[in-house]
Image (spheres, rainbow, N blue to C red):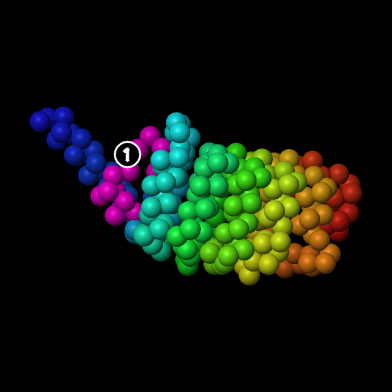
């Protein structure tokens, strides 16, 4: 009885913690149904998948919240340590459920292991217009590389807001081929982009010349 009471108290404390505009969740926390209801009020959400073995159930739980439009007020989404296969699952869930996230302005997947599959899945979501309100896209410290950027290039150029605001692709193993795809002449250069972060990649003088 004492253990049950303590567990209930901890759950209530976590729910109270979630009942704020800024919510932090890590993979070691139990996301119970009552907590999911509290998430509906979140405008800023940090989801840390570090330490989840595997992280897939947490991605599925988050996908459930998206599917029921429980996060319609969400303005900033920060996801840490997401793997490529879970990024694929995450983005496919958005496409399958036709989630729009109308208030989302910041999409941050820095510090994960997103590669070609995850980048292509994100590209499909952007192409569909599901994240049309997004302004800042942060994909730093992943493994997107040239092939991943090639998949993302056209949707990024055509996105109504990201193409005019901020995109971070730092430390992704991106080289000249990726830059060439992003700045393809026939599609037009991202002339209105306020900030494009490409530090710690493998771009040579050839790629730098393309950005002049």
The residue depicted at 79 percent of the width and 59 percent of the height is: 183
The residue depicted at 59 percent of the width and 54 percent of the height is: 122
Q: In the image, is residue 200 above or below residue 70?
A: above
Q: Residue furthest bottom?
A: 160
What span is colored magenta in the figure? 25-39
Name the quarter where the C terminus is drawn.
bottom right
Q: In the image, is residue 170 above or below residue 53?
A: below
The residue depicted at 68 percent of the width and 67 percent of the height is: 158
Name the side, left or right, on which 132 lies relative to 49.
right
Q: Which residue is mark 1?
A: 30
Measured from the top left, where is residue 58 in percent x and y? 41, 42
Q: Secondary structure at mark 1?
A: loop
Measured from the top left, where is residue 76 in percent x and y? 49, 57
Is any atom of residue 8 visible in this view?
Answer: yes
Is any atom of residue 135 visible in this view?
Answer: no
Q: Nearer the viewer, residue 156 or 195?
A: 156
């Amino acid at each position: 009885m004492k253990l049950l009471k303590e567990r209930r108290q901890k759950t209530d404390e976590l729910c109270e913690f979630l009942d704020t505009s800024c919510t932090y969740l890590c993979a070691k926390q139990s996301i119970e149904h009552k907590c999911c209801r509290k998430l509906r009020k979140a405008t800023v959400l940090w989801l840390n998948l570090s330490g989840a073995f595997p992280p897939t159930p947490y991605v599925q739980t988050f996908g459930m919240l998206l599917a029921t439009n429980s996060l319609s007020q969400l303005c900033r989404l920060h996801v840490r340590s997401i793997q490529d296969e879970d990024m694929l699952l995450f983005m496919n869930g958005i496409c399958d459920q036709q989630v729009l996230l109308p208030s989302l302005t910041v999409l941050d997947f820095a510090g994960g292991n997103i590669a070609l599959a995850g980048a292509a899945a994100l590209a499909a979501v952007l192409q569909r217009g599901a994240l049309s309100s997004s302004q800042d896209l942060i994909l730093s410290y992943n493994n997107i590389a040239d092939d991943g950027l090639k998949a993302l290039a056209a949707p990024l150029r055509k996105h109504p807001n990201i193409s005019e605001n901020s995109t971070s692709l730092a430390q992704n193993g991106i080289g000249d081929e990726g830059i060439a795809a992003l700045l393809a002449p026939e599609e037009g250069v991202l002339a209105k982009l306020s900030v494009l972060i490409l530090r710690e990649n493998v771009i040579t003088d050839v790629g730098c010349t393309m950005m002049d």
